[in-house]
Image (cartoon, rainbow, N blue to C red):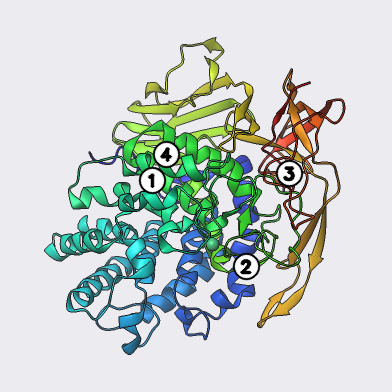
Amino acid sequence: MTTKYNYFTSKEIKPRGWLRRQLELEASGLVGNLDKVWPDIRDSAWIGGPCEGWERVPYWLDGAVPLAYLLEDEDLIARVNRYVDFILKSQKEDGWICPCTDEERINYDTWAVLLISKVLVRYYECSGDERIPDAVYRIMKNYHEMLKSGKARLFEWGEFRWFEGFPALNFLAERHDDTWIRELAAYLRDNGTDYRALKDRWVRYLNKWTLETHIVNLNMMLKQEALSNDLLNKDYEGIGEELYDFLYKYNGTPAGILTGDECLGGISPIHGSELCSVVEMMDSMSQIYAYTGNAIWAERLEKVAFNALPATISDDMWSHQYVQMSNQIDCTPFPGKSPFTTNNQEAHIFGLQPHYGCCTSNMGQGWPKLALSAFLKCTDGVISAVAMPSEVSFNFEGADVKVTLDTDYPFKNSFTYRINSSCDTAMKLKVRIPSFAKNLSVNGKNIEKEDVLTFDGFMAGETVIELSFECDTVIEKAPSGMNCVRRGALLFSLPIKEEWKIVEYVRKDIERKYPYCDYEITGHSEWEFGFDSENTITDVSENGVGSIPFAVAEPPVTVKARLTPIDWGFEEGYDKLCAKYPSSTKAMGESREMTLVPYGCAKLRMTEMPLVKK
Ligand SMILES: [Zn+2]
């Protein structure tokens, strides 16, 4: 099997509409300013400073580089270029590029070698900087020699993230026929973690920290075959499918992610899921979809991207959580003992680096990489893979083609495609239709539903295709056994009235100061409800997308549902953490009609609730 779809570059794809506004928020928020306000980027060892010199700068560049180039943001481009310039100039004669002394190399976790090589390849796709192919060649050749001679090692994070070396190896294999490239590929596979052998550890909540149950490792590894199979000359076995289903069965949440803080947390609406795992899950889902063409991965990607990602980052994109919970009634530090496994009492607050700084540097990749999944290249044209307002310009067999999609999806289900071609072309436009779509219509005519609609060939000039479908608003079972409301790709929650309080302070020389401050969010409305089991959903309103697409103050779509008060109660020892399951599902009063908003809009919310019979 070879790759089914390929990615366009950030020069070819441009975000439009609400997606552009979301990326602009990211650029004007923490991701676009991290090099100014956060020591681990501003004063990183990667640019000669005294601070962290391992994963944080590469993580930041992995998001900030495509963000800068997608938006053509000259200021951010200049700032990321400064980092890449410094890193390239610091590359040693023998090819080693990470910031440590020669003596430290033997104990330096070479996860950073894999990560920086991947990031430099992405930088090349964005910038076309001709220094990159040679720099990446020398990094990986030196890495191969050092691993062979025992002067560097694949251990701990590198061992668990071995497949992250493949974007660079694939890039080199397209340019060189050297045998060492395949030898290094085989070395990484043979000495990297075999995740299938770990499955028995994912069934029961372990209540301790292990690399084998580390949620970021597990979400990253799903894509291992998509990255490595071609170079390893291996048949596709569906490891991603098998392991996602298995992990989800024992640790899934209705937003399509896994619980983990940082390690797998079992089935629970209050356990928490780390932000790094959300963006890595999205990357895995996108890569598996591109590799296999299996639509289930595009639908899973939508579910995570349109729910779990916006839910855990503030409207202005200056603050984020370490862990999000699907039932989250308060985001202030827990007094006393932390309810999390190995996270501290503030892992769920919105802030600069609640609990730990990995997510601060890694979260930026979410939206830009999603934007690059809007349209994918196929041999006979282009597929609209994750429908979002975007445009893509490319040359197809001599025709200059531009395909534009204007839509407010996932908030509304109507789509306008404009295809502009410089001459008549045989290019095909394919449109992936979600499984939940019904009553599909093209240019006002109802048509039979297909998983992929194909429009075959276009005349010179502009062709306009108007497409729409409908979807039901449904009550469905969450992995917890309780229920949740879903409409297409969007999950809905009962929002709890939020009071945001700015918290400014300095701890260990790291300053929190508005807008890069922490927040305490206190809830001020009732949350102890179940869904009335009869006539639950009463109405749906589409309101249009505001300047902040996922704002609780102006949700683009709302659902009215009948909720019944119940006695839910708190987790033992806490007064700001709802119990995992309600203490009773007996109605405590009349049901009432209440407004639900998209999960991604509500920072305080109840999402998973029981059905209550009269
Ligand atoms: Zn993290």
Which numbered disc, 2 or 1, marks the residue closer to the eye? Answer: 2
**Which residue position holds label 1?**
287
Q: Earlier in the sequence, mark 3 or mark 1?
A: 1
Vertical order, 145 against 496 (above or below): below
Q: Secondary structure at mark 2?
A: loop
Q: Quadrant of residue 393?
A: top left
Residues under numbered marks 3 and 1 in contact, where contact means CB atoms less than 8 Å apart: no
Q: Residues under labels 3 and 2: Cα distance?
A: 22 Å
Q: Residues within 10 Å of mark 3 (few under 14, many from 20)?
A: many
- Amino acid type at circle 4 is Asp
- Amino acid type at circle 3 is Arg
Which numbered disc, 3 or 4, marks the residue closer to the eye? Answer: 4
**Which residue position holds label 4?**
245
**Which residue position holds label 3?**
605
Q: Nearer the viewer, residue 195 or 451?
A: 195
Q: Residues within 10 Å of mark 4 (few under 14, many from 20)?
A: few
* Ligand 1 - quadrant of the structure image: bottom right
* Image location (x, y in percent) of residue 559: 73, 28
Q: Residues within 10 Å of mark 2 (few under 14, many from 20)?
A: some
Q: Earlier in the sequence, mark 2 or mark 1?
A: 1
**Which residue position holds label 2?**
355
Q: Earlier in the sequence, mark 3 or mark 2?
A: 2
- Amino acid type at circle 1 is Gln
Q: Nearer the viewer, residue 245 or 434?
A: 245
Q: Residues under labels 2 and 1: Cα distance?
A: 29 Å
Q: Earlier in the sequence, mark 4 or mark 1?
A: 4
Is residue 329 rendered to the left or right of residue 525? left
Q: Earlier in the sequence, mark 4 or mark 2?
A: 4
Residue at left offset 29%, top offset 58%:
166
